[in-house]
Amino acid sequence: MDKAIVWVISVLAALFLGYVSGYVRRKAENRAMKEDIDALTRSAEEINAAIADRSWDRQRHWEMKRDAILAMQQSHGLASEALM
């Protein structure tokens, strides 16, 4: 009788430990995947910010060129009028 109880307890313990082991392994995989996704998300956000900064810089550079050309044309017009 005692051997049967020990055997049943051993089988139940093995089943329980197998379940817990699988559960913990799966949770660890999920956590690792979440960390990887978080890292990729941060990288994507940094890349998007860098692209937005470069786009803003190009836009601002174009506006400065435009303003300089307009100012030069106005000065040329004033100089032409003064010479006439």
Image (tube, rainbow, N blue to C red):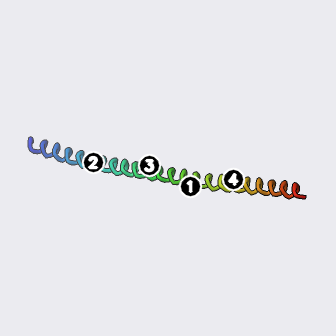
Query: Residue at the location (81% across, 57% down)?
Result: 76
- Mark 4, residue position: 64
Q: Amino acid at mark 1?
A: Ile
Q: Amino acid at mark 2?
A: Tyr
Asked whether 66 or 4 is in front, the reply is 66
Give SS at disc 3: helix
Query: Residue at the location (90% across, 58% down)?
Result: 84
Instruction: Please identify, in this view, whether the residue under mark 4 or under mark 3 is nearer the observer.
Output: 4
Instruction: Please identify, in this view, whether the residue under mark 4 or under mark 1 is nearer the observer.
Output: 4
Q: Quadrant of residue 82 in the image?
A: bottom right
Residue 49 at x, y = what percent?
54, 50
Residue 38 circle label:
3
Tell me the distance, in whole angstroms, between the alpha carbons under discs 3 and 1. 20 Å
Tell me the distance, in whole angstroms, between the alpha carbons under discs 4 and 1. 20 Å
- Mark 2, residue position: 19
Q: Amino acid at mark 3?
A: Asp
Query: Residue at the location (24% across, 49% down)?
Result: 18
Q: Amino acid at mark 4?
A: Met
In primary-sequence order, the first of circles 2 and 4 is 2
Image position of 19 (left or right of 42)? left
Residue 8 at x, y = what percent?
16, 45
Residue 23 circle label:
none
Instruction: Please identify, in this view, whether the residue under mark 2 or under mark 4 is nearer the observer.
Output: 4
Instruction: Please identify, in this view, whether the residue under mark 1 or under mark 2 is nearer the observer.
Output: 1
Instruction: Please identify, in this view, whether the residue under mark 3 or under mark 1 is nearer the observer.
Output: 1
Tell me the distance, in whole angstroms, between the alpha carbons under discs 4 and 3. 39 Å
In primary-sequence order, the first of circles 1 and 2 is 2
Tell me the distance, in whole angstroms, between the alpha carbons under discs 1 and 2. 48 Å
Residue 51 circle label:
1
Give SS at disc 1: helix
Q: Quadrant of the N terminus?
A: top left
